[in-house]
């Protein structure tokens, strides 16, 4: 957890939102609120980001100090990959660790438009297990063959860690940060959130299964692991109907609560 706030204003760069930016702000704020509803939060200390359409060097992230349920399209902070704040409506600045992690990936992986990072109990617990994510559930098999790992180096405040984060992520879109938490990314918010939702569930199942003792667990057979790897590849472009249905159902669930 960082108590340091990164504030490097870039004066005069505030501009009216395009329709595309308004849409991504809306969807990113929904992702924050869904994470709060699903209890994927760690008070004010984790962060989701999304690249601003048409502004490839700029991304949106949460102001440092607001709870996830407090995030709205209007109060998101816009920064560039060099750490300059473009628009800071709350005046709170951003979490330095959020800048280090998200800017590194946004800079190195232009194909990943959205990056979600959590410190949930079960996600952090799996990150602290020697073997990482195990092939114990259908949820886990969705990621088992492509998940990557980054060793813990302390709170992510140092810019020189960025090159190792990017190296360890490689060509993947899901990573376990050892002794830390989870990271899921995608080509759009629907894809990234589906990755995160399923990965969090895989970690829930793993911790529950291991509670019965390591000798009692039954890993999936290798043939099934390979089959699910091939089946999961059909969702790689982020625009498949299942990914959109998954997101739409979550948004309806959230909006139903708003009406009551």
Image (tube, rainbow, N blue to C red):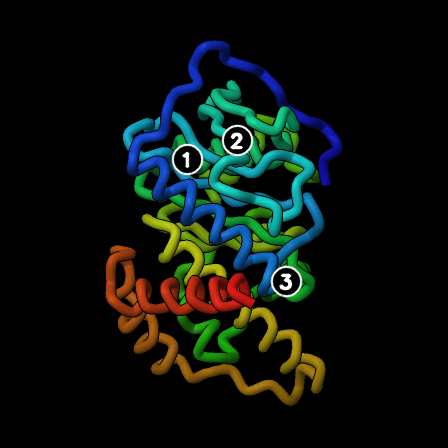
Q: Which residue in the rendered view is the most extreme toward the bottom?
A: 216
Where residue 220 appears, x then y in whole percent? Answer: 46, 83
Q: CA distance from mark 1 to mark 2?
A: 16 Å
In this rendering, is residue 24 above or below 31? above
Q: CA distance from mark 2 to mark 3?
A: 23 Å
The disc at residue 5 is none
Q: Specify whether 42 is left or right of 89.
A: right
**Residue matched to label 1:** 106
**For the residues carrying marks 1 and 2, which lies nearer the camera in this image?**
2
The disc at residue 39 is 3
Q: Nearer the viewer, residue 67 or 178?
A: 67
Q: Quadrant of residue 7?
A: top right
Give the residue displayed 40% in from the left and 52% down from the top. 173
Q: Quadrant of the C terminus?
A: bottom right
Q: Nearer the viewer, residue 157 or 27?
A: 27
Give the residue displayed 52% in from the left and 43% down from the top. 72
**Residue matched to label 2:** 77
Q: Specify whether 2 is left or right of 244.
A: right
| Helix, strand or loop under label 3 | loop
Q: In the rendered structure, are the residues bearing label 3 and label 1 in contact, judged by CB atoms less than 8 Å apart? A: no
Q: Quadrant of the N terminus?
A: top right
* N-term mark: 3 or 1: 3
């Amino acid at each position: 957890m960082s108590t340091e706030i990164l504030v490097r204003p870039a004066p005069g760069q505030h501009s009216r939102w395009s329709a595309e930016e308004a849409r991504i702000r809306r969807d990113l704020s929904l992702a924050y609120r869904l994470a709060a509803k699903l209890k994927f939060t760690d008070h004010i200390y984790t962060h989701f980001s999304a690249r601003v359409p048409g502004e490839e060097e700029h991304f949106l992230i949460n102001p440092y100090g607001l709870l996830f349920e407090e995030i709205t399209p209007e109060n998101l902070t816009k920064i560039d990959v060099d750490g300059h704040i473009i628009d800071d409506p709350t005046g709170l600045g951003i979490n330095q660790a959020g800048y280090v992690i998200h800017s590194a990936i946004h800079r190195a992986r232009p194909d990943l438009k959205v990056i979600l990072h959590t410190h949930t109990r079960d996600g952090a617990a799996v990150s602290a297990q020697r073997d990482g994510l195990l092939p114990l559930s259908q949820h886990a098999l969705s990621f088992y063959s492509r998940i990557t790992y980054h060793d813990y180096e302390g709170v992510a405040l140092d810019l020189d860690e960025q090159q190792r984060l990017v190296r360890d992520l490689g060509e993947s879109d899901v990573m376990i940060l050892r002794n830390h938490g989870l990271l899921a990314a995608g080509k759009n918010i629907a894809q990234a959130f589906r990755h995160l939702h399923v990965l969090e569930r895989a970690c829930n199942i793993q911790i529950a299964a291991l509670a019965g003792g390591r000798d009692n667990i039954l890993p999936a057979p290798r043939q099934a692991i390979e089959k699910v790897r091939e089946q999961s590849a059909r969702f790689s472009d982020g625009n498949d109907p299942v990914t959109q249905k998954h997101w739409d159902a979550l948004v309806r669930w959230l909006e139903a609560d708003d009406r009551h």
